[in-house]
Amino acid sequence: MLAKKSKVEDKSKKQTSLNQEDKPEIKKIKKQATEKKQYNIKDFVVYPKHGVGKIIAVEKAKIGQIEIQFYKIFIEKEKLTLTVPINQQSNLRPISSINQINKCVSILKSKPKIKRTMWSRRAQEYDQKINSGKIYELAEVVKDLNKNTDIIADQSYSERQLFEKAYDRLKSEFEAVLKTTPEEVQKKMDKALGRNKNLLED
């Protein structure tokens, strides 16, 4: 009986030691997945509050005794150059893949969500989505605020402002990913949204 017990104990010890050996490997994989991505000159990136930009330089500067390396990012739509320290690059994301753009087109084609909440609250939610840097949330704002028309009277001023902001952000990422003209991208987006159907059919 004692011999049997010791065998069982030995087996359980081996199993626990194997489990302990496995654990560090799982942790290592998690660390690798969360490693910061390094970007290069001419790479397109998305900065949540400004949209698509192009890295035009990687420079160094000394602040006191500390040497800081940073990206210079040019935002074409706003004619703005941002300085982003490399140790804060978690604020950036790479531009979307073709598959993500195709999913955005599907979102634009879907029915808008009609919310009954006050406009001030909805406007705040839309603004947060626009500045989140997440392309699917951006596409949802464009879809929900789309009125299928260019007639200004059909939208309030603040509604139209938010729509145009979201539309332009989404359009600039489509341009960077699809590597095509703004006109072609606009046609693609407007067709998905069902905007100006009469004009498109002519």
Image (cartoon, rainbow, N blue to C red):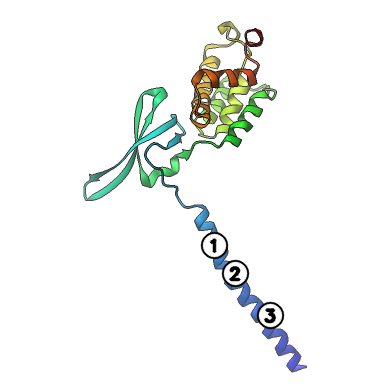
Camera sees residue 129: yes
Q: Is residue 158 above or below residue 50?
A: above
Label placed on residue 12: 3
Mark nearer the N terminus (1 vs 2): 2
Quarter location, residue 57 = top left
Q: 142 or 95, which is in the foreground?
A: 95
In whole angstroms, how far apart are the C-alphas of marks 1 and 2? 9 Å
Label placed on residue 151: none
* Mark 2 lies on residue: 22
Contact (Cβ within 8 Å) of mark 1 with mark 3: no
Mark nearer the N terminus (1 vs 3): 3
* Mark 1 lies on residue: 27
Question: Which secondary structure lies at badge 2?
Answer: helix
Judge left or right: residue 13 versus residue 4: left
Quarter location, residue 103 = top right
Question: Which secondary structure lies at badge 3?
Answer: helix
Between label 3 and label 2, give the one nearer the viewer: 2
